[in-house]
Amino acid sequence: MNIYVGNLDYKVNENDLQGIFEDYGNVSSAKVITDKYSGRSKGFGFVTMEEESEAKKAIDELNGATLENRAMVVNEARPKKNNY
């Protein structure tokens, strides 16, 4: 399952994100989205977890949880829209 993680402090990196979600199960990937020009975090990212049950538990428990003094927004990622 692909999980959206928003309202992240700009200091949070991919290793931090992966570490948080590994408490709930196997993490396939963790990606913090960055600005392509400045390289600075945009304050959100995505985590992919293999097991749907583990992913749902992580979403339930981490949505609203505080990380670096910010309440994270955690939910199932919606498919990317294609703008043709």
Image (cartoon, grey):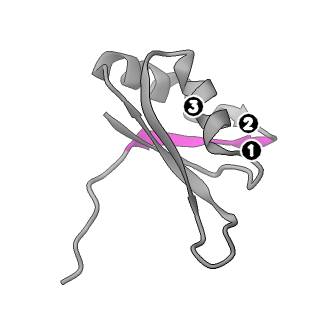
Question: From what the image shows, is residue 38 above or below residue 7?
Answer: below
- Quarter of the image for residue 50 reads top left
Q: Residue type at mark 3: give it.
A: Gln
For the residue carrying disc 3, how many other residues have a C-alpha within 10 Å: few (<14), some (14-19), or many (20+)? many
Q: Residue at x 39, y 25 (%)?
A: 55
Range covered by the magenta-colored residues:
69-76
The secondary structure that most of the magenta stretch takes on is strand
Q: Is residue 80 left or right of residue 73?
A: left
**Which image quadrant: the C terminus?**
bottom left
Q: Position of residue 31 (x, y in %)?
A: 51, 47
Query: What residue sits right under mark 2 in the picture?
Result: 67
For the residue carrying disc 2, how many other residues have a C-alpha within 10 Å: few (<14), some (14-19), or many (20+)? some
Query: What residue sits right under mark 3 in the picture?
Result: 18
Q: Residue at x 31, y 19 (%)?
A: 51
CA gap, disc 3 to disc 2?
13 Å
- Quarter of the image for residue 25 reads top left
Query: What residue sits right under mark 1 in the picture?
Result: 70
Do callouts 3 and 2 mark residues in contact (Cβ within 8 Å)? no
Please state which of residues 12 and 55 is positioned toward the viewer in this rendering: 12
Asked if the stretch drawn in magenta spans residue 42, the answer is: no
Q: Residue at x 61, y 36 (%)?
A: 17
Return the disc, 3 or 2, that comes first in the chain's sequence.
3
